[in-house]
Image (cartoon, rainbow, N blue to C red):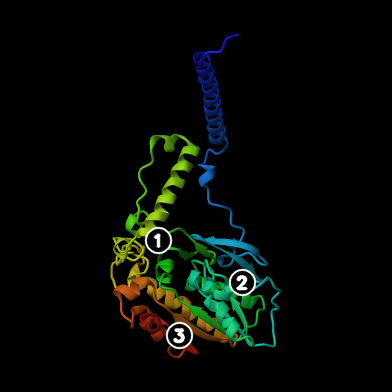
Amino acid sequence: MSWSPKSATSKLFRILFINVSLLLGLFIVAEIVLHLVYKGGNPFLAPARNELRVRDAHFTHGLKPNFDGFDAWGSNTVRIYTNSLGFRDAAVRDVPMTTDRKRVVFIGDSFTESLGVPYEESFVGRFAQAFPAIDVLNAGVSSYAPSVYYEKLKYFLDAGLKFDEAVVYIDISDIQDEAILYSYAPDGVLQMGLFQTGAEECSPVPRPPLPRAERRWWEKVSYIGEFLGQMRYSAQLARAIERASFDDLSKSRAVYSRDYARPSWTYSDDSRCYGDLGIEASIDKAKRQMDRLHELLSSHGVTLSVGVYPWPQQLLYDGENSRQARLWRDWCAGKCRKFFDHFPDFFR
């Protein structure tokens, strides 16, 4: 049998055609199966299951007790330990309800929990290392606000946890959280709702430096195509963030912009993103919940201290004597053992 370049080329094209057809067929079958099984949405883009963060019937949400694993915040993945109470700690450990040592409980939101930072580098972890004679507990969890500070500490006091002092670090975002995230059900149980994000300018997530382009037709019909498109955008966004200037990050509703609604209440009276309550009533609500916490702690012989610190917006568009600092300094008069104002530290 004679060999010719023409017959070899024809055979190669047949092989390529068969393989491409098989791959295309498998792709179509895979898409059909995925759409039949996952009718609610793209499984490749579903949020990853996080065993660390759990719901709680008493104070909305918390951390899983005795957890030893990892948690991600942006590009940072750190090892996380929680103790038997479900508080972030240096290691998994059993925490007795009573102790002979002085015990201080810190509580706050994501800054106090210290997302993306090893416990030893968090400010609570550093405090614990600096004062080894004190039993330091960190009850802070992302998205907490005064309503949760009250309910969580009440829950553990009612359960028999004994401590000498509570240090509450009140975040700038607590006012908006009280406005549109937390409310009480008719039975008196604290409920955590959803941010009112109908208006784009009210999104709790700042605008990225690279807008997401409209999905192409193949991203709309294909789960795999949608996933690849998202991966492409994520890579482009990472490069855009690396190259971004301060001006890029200060554009309207960007992470350092003046009109980013979440931290703007200290220097702006624009209350569009503070729900039906508005800024002033939300501040009053936060103060009332802190009043309840002060009364609760006093009834148990526990002293209270409060700390405040700025966001970048306060450093950029506000002053050292910010409304946040004035508000809680005045509230603390006659109630707090100590008021920690970290605004001067950050302004320096």
Disc 3 is placed on an element classified as strand
- Residue type pointed to by label 1: Pro
Q: CA distance from mark 1 to mark 2?
A: 25 Å
Q: Which mark is residue 204?
A: 1
Percent position (x, y) of residue 14? 53, 18
Q: Is residue 242 above or below residue 305?
A: above
Most extreme residue toward the top, as rendered? 1
Q: CA distance from mark 3 to mark 2?
A: 22 Å
Percent position (x, y) of residue 322? 34, 80
Asked if one can make out residue 265 in the rendered structure from this viewpoint, the answer is yes
* Residue that label 2 marks: 87
Residue in the picture at 37% in, 78% down: 324
Percent position (x, y) of residue 71? 57, 62
* Residue 196: quadrant of the picture: bottom left
Residue in the picture at 69% in, 82% down: 98
Q: Considering depth in this image, is 201 or 176 the residue closer to the camera?
A: 201
| Quadrant of the image containing the C terminus | bottom left
